[in-house]
Amino acid sequence: MSAEAGEQVPIYDVVGVGFGPSNLALAIALAEHNAGAAEPVTAHFLERQPRFGWHRGMLIDTATMQVSFLKDLVTMRNPTSEFSFVNYLHSVGRLVDFINHKNLFPLRVEFHDYFEWAAAKVDDVVSYGVEVVDVRPVLDGAEIAFFDVATSDGATLRARNLVMSTGLRPQLPDGVTVGPRIWHNSELLHRVERLKNADPRRFVVVGAGQSAAEVAALLHDEFPRAEVCAVFARYGYSPADDSSFANRIFDPEAVDHFYRAGEPVKDRLMRYHGSTNYSAVDIDLIDELYRRVYREKVLGTQRLRLFNVSRPVEVLDTGATVTAAIESLTTGERTILDADAVIYATGYLPADPTPLLGALGAQCVRDAEDRLRVERDYRVTTEAAVRGGIYLQGGTEHTHGITSSLLSNTAVRVGEILASIVNRRAISPSPQPDEFAVSIQ
């Protein structure tokens, strides 16, 4: 629906698009702010999934987080928050057990349960099973005063500010089309369940990062009669650099340093510290996979095969199996593998928010490389006619550094976004709803 001139329409200070960990953390920050605020910040979040979920297809029950539990949804912003992971542990009766575990890194399924626990506490400000279909500018004279967010259930929410947290999208090599026997690792657990009665004989796993190693290990465990072929361009799995000094690239002040740096320095920092996150594997998992390969060589029953310094050059679904041609990068020799499935653990890309913004996309300023320009407070730089703020949670790696889509800085980031929204409201109070005209279709 569209608002006619003069019609009273409820306005939210914030409408959040997407409700993964980042916007969940923002909802919590808003709740804590409003508890002591004379003028609350009103907000509502829209999530297309039917319930809260975070990489459910990779919630392997043996996998652990790669960040400290202290980098939860709140602690680095508010150490006394009731929404902390420590308070979650206390509420479920596992605090003493976790302390005795002497481990900074919880199980991934445990951290997901923590997210669900926190999400349930703020579920009054989120609508699940609702997709954003359009965002329309609302004019006040020549200025864009508000944003009308149209949803798949026919509703429209009017917002002073948008916070876009549309998550990541699976990345596949050019020419690869997913299907019953070719898929991205994000679907792992759903697919594995369907394969358990099929007695598969061979899997091909493409990729050299943490997810690829986890997929190879899980398939090797779950299907003891199957061969698992790991294919990657590197000589071997490379360990993630989680040393103390290297981890400072995730510190909140590192965002300031990165943001102020020139493009050559930004590029250099990403190259220097990419191994903290990209195409890198926990050393314990590397050692475990090596033990398996060595043990099988001793026993003469090799099921875990590594095709290193190699790449798949042709993958063809024949209707019954997948034929994968694996080419050595050093010799050019090809090995043909008939497999039950080829799994691409080839990472993710941030979702581009501009298609959702419709006509507003033209009001967003881009740099010389056609990337969105983003202010230090994570607000997209817009033309002067846009009065409201469009904030990004994710997709800001080129401006804010490696923590853009990671949990490491989430609690601090949402605090900065909230502070920006509150401060901008104080400086430029918005007009009353009866002062502006129809939203643009």
Image: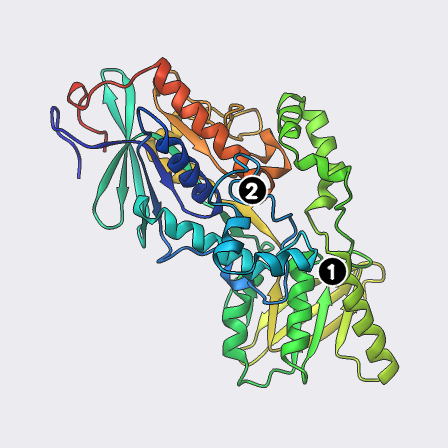
Asked whether residue 192 is in view, the answer is: yes
Residue where numbered disc 1 is placed: 232
Residue where numbered disc 2 is placed: 405
Q: Report whether 150 appears left or right of 405.
A: left
Q: Residue at x 36, y 52 (%)?
A: 48
Work out whether residue 382 or residue 327 is closer to the camera in this orientation and state it.
Answer: 382
Instruction: Reply above or below: 364 against 188.
Output: above
Tell me the quadrant of the picture where the N terminus can be found: top left
At label 1, the amino acid type is Phe
SS at badge 1: loop
Q: Residue at x 52, y 60 (%)?
A: 93
**Crowd around label 1: few <14 · some 14–19 · many ≥20 (10 Å):** many
Work out whether residue 156 or residue 89 is closer to the camera in this orientation and state it.
Answer: 89
Work out whether residue 360 or residue 105 is closer to the camera in this orientation and state it.
Answer: 105
**Crowd around label 2: few <14 · some 14–19 · many ≥20 (10 Å):** many
SS at badge 2: helix
Residue 58: x and y in percent read: 56, 62
| Name of the residue lying farthest toward the right | 298
Q: Residue at x 23, y 50 (%)?
A: 153
- Whichever of callouts 1 and 2 sits on the residue coming sooner in the sequence is 1
Instruction: Reply above or below: 60 against 156.
Output: below
| Name of the residue lying farthest toward the front | 96
At label 2, the amino acid type is Ser
Residue 372: x and y in percent read: 50, 29
Quadrant in the rendering for residue 294: bottom right
Residue 92: x and y in percent read: 49, 59
